[in-house]
Image: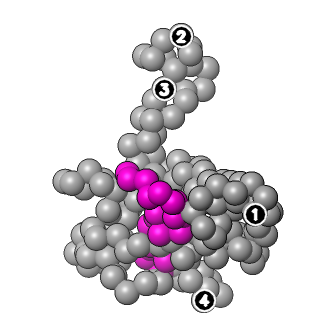
Amino acid sequence: GAESVTVAASTSGADLWQQNLADFSGKGPTGDGRMMPHIVTPGADIWSAKAGGNCLSTNNAIQDMGGTSMAAPVCAGGVALARQYIREGFYPSGAKAVSSGWSPSGALLRAMILNSGQALSGIMDASGSGGSPFQPLQKSLPNNQQGYGALTLTKILRFTPAVSG
């Protein structure tokens, strides 16, 4: 729908900064010609809660996981932070002003997330297309490899005074 976001997963390369498109991520276009995915978030080497794990022991409570099922919650967390930013009145000044807060629509949050995109600098596994197994990603956004790029909250959430990191 108009308020949905399709998420692809990135994976680490030699630099460990999740700049490559994961081989398990879907790419577009869709069967009816629409561009997919919309945005990319980390989806490989994610430490997650382990089903049936023992919270009293780090050996049994978490596990290393990967997949778009790991990337989607990263995106959902970004959307939640963008929503909180507006609801708590940080928009438009960047300083908290509770009286300025309001409830953003899903369409606005989607637009913010897509506008936060930044092109990945790595490669993708294209071995299924009969060519070279690894090819550079298209840099012009949006595209059917990485959509609008990697979710980058610092492009849409500004704070006064500025925060680093």
Residue 137 visible in the shown view: yes
- Determine the CA span between mark 3 and mark 2: 11 Å
Quadrant position of residue 59:
top left
Residue at horizontal 41 percent and vertical 72 percent from the top: 118
Judge from the rendering whether residue 68 lies leftward or rightward of residue 127; answer left or right: right
Judge from the rendering whether residue 129 lies leftward or rightward of residue 159; answer left or right: left
Which residue was labeled with disc 4? Answer: 33
Does 150 lie within the magenta span? Answer: yes
Foreground mark, 4 or 1, reads 1
- Determine the CA span between mark 3 and mark 4: 39 Å
Q: Residues within 10 Å of mark 1 (few under 14, many from 20)?
A: some
Residue closer to the observer: 61 or 135 = 61
Which residue was labeled with disc 2? Answer: 56
Judge from the rendering whether residue 84 lies leftward or rightward of residue 47; answer left or right: right
Residue at horizontal 53 percent and vertical 69 percent from the top: 156
Element at label 2: loop
Q: Residues within 10 Å of mark 3 (few under 14, many from 20)?
A: some
